Amino acid sequence: MFNRRKFIQASAFSTGAMALGQKYLNLPSGTVNKPIVISTWDFGVAANEAAWKVLTKNGSALDAVEQGVSIIEAQGTNQSVGYGGLPDRDGVVTLDACIMDEKGNCGAVLALEKIMHPISVARRVMEKTPHVMLAGDGALQFALSEGFKPMNLLTPSSEKAWKEWLKQAKYQPSINIENKLYEKVAPKKLPGNQYNHDTIGMLALDEKGNLSGACTTSGMAFKLHGRVGDSPIIGAGLYIDNEIGGATSTGVGEEVIRNVGSFLVVELMRQGYTPEQACKEAVMRIIKKKPETAKNIQVGFLAINKNGEYGAFAIQQGFTFAVCDKNKQDLVLKGKSYY
Ligand code: GLY
């Protein structure tokens, strides 16, 4: 039954959302902040730069997000995305990625081995197959049939980290690396805590006003072989609704999947929440269900709406995101957090 009270609440948020967005972005009424691209974490700056080149040439948001996150997949210097990602507990690097466009088309690869650019394989799944997801060896065989070249994704430094971890072999997902409290919460003497992951999730709004998103990661360090996180799961690690907005997540994927996090954020924006309010509410669901677990893990959401207004919220301090629009190309902002 139609709930009038809830409708009024949502309308109140809607008005607030507009006021907040306009103040924050200095948008004159009725204008849209486009093109724009936003990405999780500090390394999003480099990814945004590549995406921005596409967007400013009137390219599509879809091309922008694919090319943007590809930069991070190929870096080899970060240990949480693509080449150079930390392996699973058997020493195998397995990658998860998904992509979604303005028409609701999507593709994903799960636990893909040996391929540097899982995001591009995910796009081929979307465009060249009737399916949404390919996993494991099937994903690899598909990638090879599409001309992707196999390679060793395990860099010497990630192999060294894995061998170090094997000494205690304690699996203990922890707070994000960027967290200033990291040393306090996750002291180096606990090998399981020295490593964790931070996915790159990217959301773009192009000149035509279309939204797309991409999400890619090597997942949790030293995970069980075959473990898949939220990043390649449409609705969990990424969701786009071209009428409303898009959302992506980072952090402990299991908790994001349990709450279908990114879909929830977009649906909350549909009800009138600002991007930040929607991200906060999704975080609060996780905390409410598992307060004890939430104390020691990180989950962060990042969202954008159709006006190009954006926001983020995380369980723990330290969640950063990168913004690139006409006003500023290398902006890094701190998401608000519960703790
Ligand atoms: N958020 C990435 C993962 O849990 O694998």
Image: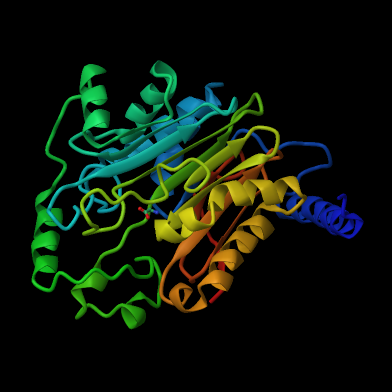
Looking at the image, residue 203 lies above or below residue 193: above
Q: Is residue 111 visible?
A: yes
Q: Give the image location of residue 28, x and y in percent.
A: 81, 42
Looking at the image, residue 80 lies above or below residue 31: below
Q: Give the image location of residue 219, x and y in percent.
A: 31, 52
53 or 193, which lies in front? 193
Looking at the image, residue 220 lies above or below residue 239: below
Give the quarter the ligand 1 occupies.
bottom left
Q: How many marks?
A: 0
Residue drawn where x is 37% and y is 39% of the image: 97
Direction from residue 327 to residue 219 in the image, left or right: left
Residue drawn where x is 22% and y is 77% of the image: 188
Q: Give the image location of residue 128, x and y in percent.
A: 39, 16
Quarter of the figure with residue 311? bottom right
Residue drawn where x is 39% and y is 19% of the image: 129
Quarter of the figure with residue 239? top right
Direction from residue 165 to residue 240 in the image, left or right: right
118 or 200, which lies in front? 118
Q: Give the image location of residue 4, x and y in percent.
A: 91, 55
Q: Residue furthest front?
A: 1
Q: What colour scheme has been applied to the protein in the rendered image?
A: rainbow
Q: Is residue 50 visible?
A: no
